[in-house]
Image (cartoon, helix red, strand yellow):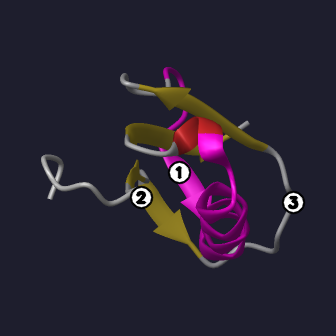
Amino acid sequence: MTGSGLNWTIVCPPRLNSGPRTRRIRSRVGANVRGSYRLGRADLADFLLRAAADDVLARATVSVAAA
């Protein structure tokens, strides 16, 4: 997939929980987010929707976690 001509984004979340959406998400391209090991499913969904429209994240691997 990474060798294709398509735009792609790989998002690596930590342990997911069922907390409410907070929009407090930290992300790091090409490396793990340090110091946080959880993220709400609602926040992950919010990040995925925004990442799909973000050209900066095209063809990148992104780690996400709660802020």
Magenta stretch encompasses residue 41: yes
Q: Earlier in the sequence, mark 3 or mark 2?
A: 2
Instruction: Check whether the beta carbons of the residues at disc 1 and disc 2 lie within 8 A of each other.
Output: yes
Percent across and percent down for residue 16 are: 49, 66
Where residue 25 sits, quadrant-wise, is: top right
Percent across and percent down for residue 8 are: 38, 57
Q: Secondary structure at mark 3?
A: loop
User: What span is colored magenta in the figure?
Assistant: 34-55
Label 2 crowding class (10 Å Cα cut-off): few <14, some 14-19, many 20+? Answer: few
Q: Nearer the viewer, residue 61 or 65?
A: 61
Q: Earlier in the sequence, mark 1 or mark 2?
A: 2
The residue that mark 1 highlights is: 38
Horizontal side of residue 36 vs 46, given as left or right: left
C-alpha separation, residue under disc 1 versus residue under disc 3 = 13 Å
The residue that mark 2 highlights is: 15
Q: Amino acid at mark 1?
A: Arg
Q: Which mark is residue 22?
A: 3
Q: Amino acid at mark 2?
A: Arg
Instruction: Check whether the beta carbons of the residues at disc 3 and disc 2 lie within 8 A of each other.
Output: no
Horizontal side of residue 43 vs 29, given as left or right: right
Magenta stretch encompasses residue 44: yes
